[in-house]
């Protein structure tokens, strides 16, 4: 058995994700980051919402919560405030996090709650019928946008930074070791960390957008992702149809648990 396999509930495998789905890659990157940072199954909690990505918590051998749609961050916040010594990791999706969970997302970042939020972005609602999500790119097709969506998508990383997150990063299912490193750095950060994991969805997104084969989506990630250091040096015309990966923002600010403990101390006096 490989060292990271101990973090999975073997009796729940194989998983239910479609062949070629990128969620398994992202889930493996999370457990490898946990192992890299020396976290244990006893001091780590995994919280998820609803959706394809959020099924990951059921496969992971930790104390886990599979919560209501969009509500993973407030559940995780409660755990962190009640048990600040625990490492709390949230697994969410582009629809779960930025649609019904959007307010929880921005306020978790605003408060700088010490959570590591890994957002699996497959650009669509994969589990519930292939509807367009707030992160579906312009002019891409979905069941609710058969002629292409005209809604401008959220950039979750920019949104997290603007809302107050102290660590923001992005990687892809193609850049496996890089994704693991970005999650590990997020675990190290004492505050709200967002890691956007670009993952392929060959079934709901791929079939409608000429990426039906997982290899096509993986090649797109390979060719479209640009490391942040190189991205900053590119002229505007070279950035068209590409996106940066790496640590996009990092800052230090008092985390919410520390601030809240000061309130408790003042009240007790």
Image (cartoon, rainbow, N blue to C red):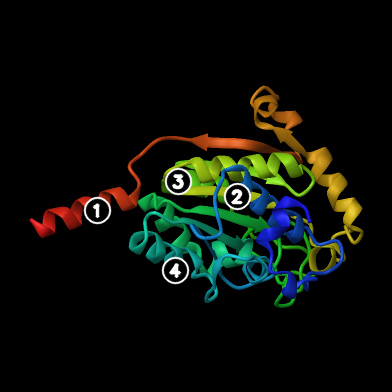
Query: Which SS class for mark 1?
Result: helix
Dividing the picture into quadrants, the one containing residue 56 is bottom right
The answer to whether mark 1 and mark 3 are in CB contact below 8 A is no
Closer to viewer: mark 1 or mark 3 = 1
Q: Earlier in the sequence, mark 1 or mark 4?
A: 4
Q: CA–CA distance between discs 1 and 2?
A: 26 Å
Query: Which SS class for mark 2?
Result: helix
Residue designated by label 4: 75
Looking at the image, residue 24 sits to the left or right of residue 38; the answer is: right
Residue designated by label 3: 165
Looking at the image, residue 69 sits to the left or right of residue 245; the answer is: left
Looking at the image, residue 30 sits to the left or right of residue 88; the answer is: right
Q: Position of residue 123 (x, y in %)?
A: 71, 59
Q: How many residues crowd mark 1 within 10 Å: few (<14), some (14–19), many (20+)? A: few
Q: CA–CA distance between discs 1 and 4?
A: 18 Å
Q: Position of residue 142 (x, y in %)?
A: 76, 68
Q: Earlier in the sequence, mark 1 or mark 3?
A: 3
Q: Residue at x 70, y 77 (%)?
A: 128
Closer to viewer: mark 1 or mark 4 = 1
Q: Earlier in the sequence, mark 1 or mark 2?
A: 2
The answer to whether mark 3 and mark 2 are in CB contact below 8 A is no
The numbered mark at residue 261 is: 1
Q: Earlier in the sequence, mark 4 or mark 2?
A: 2
Dividing the picture into quadrants, the one containing residue 268 is bottom left
Q: Is residue 31 above or below residue 242?
A: below
Closer to viewer: mark 4 or mark 2 = 2
């Amino acid at each position: 058995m490989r060292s990271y396999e101990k973090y999975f509930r073997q009796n729940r495998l194989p998983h239910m994700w479609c062949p070629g789905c990128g969620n398994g890659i992202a889930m493996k990157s999370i457990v490898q980051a946990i192992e890299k940072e020396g976290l244990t199954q006893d001091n780590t909690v995994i919280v998820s919402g609803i959706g394809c990505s959020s099924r990951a918590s059921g496969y992971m051998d930790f104390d886990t919560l599979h919560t209501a749609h969009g509500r993973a961050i407030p559940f995780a916040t409660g755990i962190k405030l009640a048990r600040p010594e625990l490492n709390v990791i949230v697994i969410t999706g582009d629809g779960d996090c930025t649609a019904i969970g959007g307010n929880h997302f921005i306020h978790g970042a605003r408060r700088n709650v010490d959570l590591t939020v890994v957002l699996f972005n497959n650009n669509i609602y994969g589990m519930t019928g292939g509807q367009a999500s707030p992160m579906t790119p312009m002019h891409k097709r979905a069941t609710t946008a058969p002629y292409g969506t005209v809604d401008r998508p959220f950039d979750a990383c920019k949104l997290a930074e603007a809302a107050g997150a102290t660590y923001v990063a992005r990687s892809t299912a193609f850049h496996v070791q890089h994704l693991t490193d970005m999650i590990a750095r997020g675990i190290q950060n004492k505050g709200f960390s967002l890691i956007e994991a670009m993952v392929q969805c060959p079934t709901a997104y791929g079939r409608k957008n000429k990426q039906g084969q997982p290899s096509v989506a993986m090649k797109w990630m390979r060719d479209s992702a640009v490391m942040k250091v190189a991205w900053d040096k590119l002229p505007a015309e070279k950035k068209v149809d590409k996106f940066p990966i790496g640590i996009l923002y990092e800052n230090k600010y008092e985390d919410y648990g520390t601030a809240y403990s000061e309130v408790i101390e003042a009240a007790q006096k």
